[in-house]
Structure formats: structure tokens, C-alpha cells
Amino acid sequence: ALRHKNQVLRLSRDAAGALRREVIVDDLPTAFYHAGGSIAVGPDGHLYVGVGDAMLPQLARDPHAPLGKLLRYTRDGRIPADNPDPTSPVFVRGLRNTQAIAWLGDGTLLGADHGPSGMAHEAGLQGRDEFNVLTAGGDYGWPDVTGWDLADGITTPAWLWETPIAPAGMAVRPGLAADSARVLVGGLRGHLE
């Protein structure tokens, strides 16, 4: 069941040391599965928030629905004027469940997206976790295109895990150029078969 309860919060202490809680982004959609969850402040100073498809894959490519997207906000929760659509927080669409984002030293945005896991609503597809170079306004195809399948207007992944790793964290060795960067991607899966 879809819930609209997730928030992005800023926690700080006031001059007296009391904890302050400020809501930056409210009403992010979520569900028990495919909730996304990546969140980071980019080198441009903006807030990036990954929202999974919440098991409603038909909305992942819809530019007006927040599900299956990487959203981009200012640090105070407004929509940046240089977003692909300056009236929308949608920065990237067509994602299934992105739980890992990071930037190379040159500002290139990377993301790791969970591929299908064999559920009935995914036509039994399994594997194809993606490592993507994410670009503003990019469409990564979920659910119509998975992995290295080709389609007009769809950005294909830079790397693909045929056997799922369930990517859930990413770190980039700082200070390296794009052509020599070292990227570490963590996975939730216990072992590969």
C-alpha cells in the first residue's frame, strides 16, 4: 500500500542546545517495497533524493509522478530553477529502486538501481541491477526497458550485474578524474551464486 508520509528533515541544535527539527521536503511517496532511499547533497549544493517505484512501475517514466525518480531540491526544499522542468523536482526518471548515488570529482552523477527481482508484476524478470551515469532529464527506461535493452530516448547503463547484488551504497575515491575514478558499490545480497 502506498503511503505519503516520508519526509526529508534537517536536524540541528539551537543556541541553548535543544534539538530543532525542520521539514525540508514533505509527502514523499513510499511503500514497503521499492522505497528508494538514496539521499545526498551534491557538489552543486542541491539535495538529491531517490524515490523508488513503490511497486507501481507504470509511474516510473511518468514525468509528473514522483515514483521511480531521482528528485532534486535546493537545501531548503525549493525546486531549483535549472531542473529539467523548473516547476518539478524530477531530475531523472525511469528508475526502479535507486538506493545509491555519488559524484565523481568532475561532478558526474552516478547511481546504482535495483533490477527486477522476479515478482509477478515484473513478468518474472530477475537480475539486471544497473550502474548508471545519471544526467539531468534522463530517462532510464524502467519498466519498459531493463539492462542493456535498447530503445529510443532511453539511456542504457554503464554497467550491469546480471546476477543481482541489490546495490545499496556507493562511494567514490575523492580527487580522481572520471577516467581513473575508483567507485565502490555495496550490496544487500548476502552472496552471489
Image: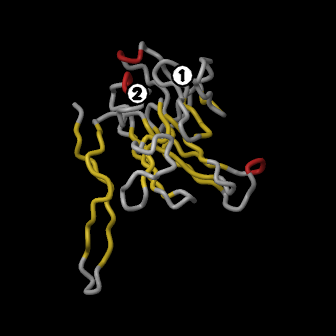
Is 167 or 176 nearer to us in this picture? 176
Q: Secondary structure at mark 1?
A: loop
122 on left or right of 145: left
User: Residue at horizontal 24%, vertical 79%?
Assistant: 18
Which residue sits furthest top?
123
User: Residue at horizontal 48%, vertical 57%?
Assistant: 46
Badge 1 is on which residue? 146
Q: Secondary structure at mark 2?
A: loop
Badge 2 is on which residue? 62
Is 32 or 43 nearer to us in this picture? 43
Q: How is the image coloured?
A: secondary structure
Q: Residues within 10 Å of mark 1 (few under 14, many from 20)?
A: many
Report the quarter where the N terminus lies: top left
22 on left or right of 62: left
Q: How many marks?
A: 2
In whole angstroms, how far apart are the C-alphas of marks 2 and 1? 16 Å
User: Residue at horizontal 60%, vertical 19%?
Assistant: 152
Is 179 or 22 nearer to us in this picture? 22
Query: Which percent across, then down, holds residue 153?
Result: 59, 23
The reply to whether discs 2 and 1 touch (Cβ–Cβ < 8 Å) is: no
Q: Which mark is drawn over residue 8?
A: none
Query: Which percent across, then down, holds residue 171?
Result: 59, 53
Q: Residues within 10 Å of mark 2 (few under 14, many from 20)?
A: some
Report the quarter where the C terminus lies: top right
User: Residue at horizontal 29%, vertical 86%?
Assistant: 15
In the displayed structure, 75 sits above or below 112; it is: below
Query: Which percent across, then down, holds residue 164?
Result: 53, 30
Which residue sits furthest right?
179
Q: Amino acid at mark 1?
A: Thr
Q: Amino acid at mark 2?
A: Asp
Query: Which percent across, then down, holds residue 37?
Result: 40, 46
- Earlier residue among tags 2 and 1: 2
